[in-house]
Amino acid sequence: MSEPKTPPAAPGLVPETPAENRQALERDRQLFHLKTLYEASQELSSPASPIDLLQWFLPMAMGPLGLTFGFAVLLRPGGVHVACLGQEEEVRKHYERSGAGLVRKFFPEAGKSPADCRPTVLVGQHLSNDPNLPTGTTVAVAISIAEDSHVVLGFGPKISKTPLEEDETELLHSLAAALAVALRKASADEQVHALNADLREKNERMEQAQNTLSRHAFQLQTLYETTLELSGSNNPLTILDTFVLTLMGTFSYASGWISLHGPETLAADVVYRGPDPDAQALLASTLGREAVLARFVELKDRMPQDQQAVLLQEPAALAALPVSAEVAVLFSVDGDWRGAIGLGTPLADTPLTEEMTQLLLSLTGTFLVTMANAKHFNLIQDLNSDLAQRNAQLQATLDDLTSAKQEIGLLTEAKERIIGLVHGEVARVWRASWLDAGLIVLAGIVLGSLFNLSSPSGIALVPPGMFEPATATVEAPAAFQETRQGEVVIIDARPVEFFNQAHIPNAVNLPKDLFNFVYAMKLSSVAPEARLIVYGRTISRHYDEDVARELRQLGHENIVVLAGGLSAWEEAGYEVEQ
């Protein structure tokens, strides 16, 4: 058989030899591989997470090499992540459960630096027999991203069923190296992002802490400056005025007032700062006093005690104050002096926060201490003034005694005469007549009167009220008819604990021990000519007579005592509240 002839070359062209054809094909393959590697590097250099890079890489490697399937298992501190292409869903679920074991098989040593570990590429049909890899696996790639992050990739056979050629294996090595660089960069980017997020969170917490510290510093500075300003005066009115201006400036209010009331009806210290010209007079009036003290009664068991303050929050209670206030505080300096603080129109619409409310109460506590000290200082001054007067009186007495010393000589001379006279009179005492006894009694009365006139705290010759006429009485049926007509005020004179056990309906409890305080709150507005029925006595104490006497001293004349007291009222079958 003759050899085939080579076709003649075209005119003007040199025919190519088989060797030249192979070289051209080889150049084309190399160019294709370089282009594939370039495009893969470009794609992998885009910002993305490690799992996204693995998703992109699988088709980049499978397409140019013509591989049938691919998978990737990423093990990192956050867990196992699986990417599959060309595999059943069961394969992905399987490696989500057991992928950590596959990765640890390739990376048994922990803590190895990824910079010293290049990607490992295994190629061969023997991989298909590995029980840890999917059936048909011919390529396995292991990449260490970080000390605690690793990835294993696997690929199936080529579609052409032929083994990978040397240049294809080299391409796979190059792609794996590019993937390793991209994964480490993505992991580093994630760490940087995590660190940035953590830093932002810490900065936010630090900023919040700085804001909190600034608020606390402001509060402490305000307390310190308020203490300095208030402690510089012992005049109650100056302290009130300074404090109300401090509150208005600290909390940004356009008006403010303080009303402080003592045990007596007209004892009041009042300060007002604002546009209302009638507010100060209203606060100092009897109506203003009653409106403030009534708020204390409403608080009941929450009533502030000595050196205490309570924030008034109920809208109805705020509306009942003598002068309008958006924020109000009730306070007690001591057992005699009580009052209220009011802040009117705010300069801003921002309500008081919990911290600002606590600051208000803290400032009020400082104010109460200063006010109590001022009251004590004034009391000490009054006592010192009284003591000075008494000392002057004592000095005058001493002067009188000094002048009387001159008479001692005369008295001494008369001593013997007096002794002799006494001896003589002693014998006569046993013969004393009724006239002598009368003279002794008269001398005692004269000496007692002189003692009482010279001593402010003298002894009363007769008990108070002994010669006062007894208060008129009214029987229970007549008193009941008067109550039905509504023209009478029933007063229970017994202590509070007896009143709480049982009392006549609508009766006002006016104990003797709290007479001034309760009268100022509940009965100061009752007309002097109003009909008053008083009841309440025990075997040993006539509370009704004592209270009736106090009421008469205040100008009430139309007073009667309920005959038989509460017992007579109950025996008559009338209603009793318990």
Image: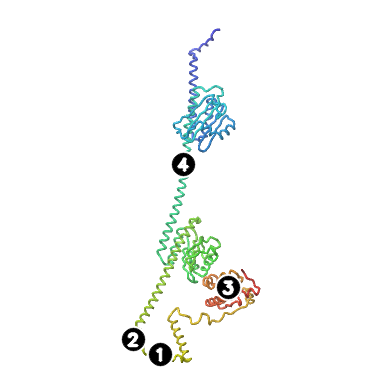
Q: Amino acid at mark 4?
A: Asn
* Helix, strand or loop under label 2: helix
Tell me the residue that label 3 is attached to: 492
Q: Amino acid at mark 1?
A: His
- Residue 45 appears in the rendering: no
Mark positioned earlier in the residue sequence (2 or 3): 2
Which quarter shows the N terminus? top right
* Helix, strand or loop under label 3: strand
Mark positioned earlier in the residue sequence (1 or 2): 2
Q: Amino acid at mark 2?
A: Gly
Tell me the residue that label 1 is attached to: 423
**Figure check: 403 above or below 56:** below
- Disc sitting over residue 196 in the figure: 4
- Disc sitting over residue 60 in the figure: none
In space, the residues marked 2 and 4 are separated at their CA atoms by 109 Å
Tell me the residue that label 2 is attached to: 409
Mark positioned earlier in the residue sequence (2 or 4): 4
Q: Quadrant of residue 66?
A: top right
Q: Quadrant of residue 219?
A: bottom left
In space, the residues marked 1 and 2 are separated at their CA atoms by 22 Å
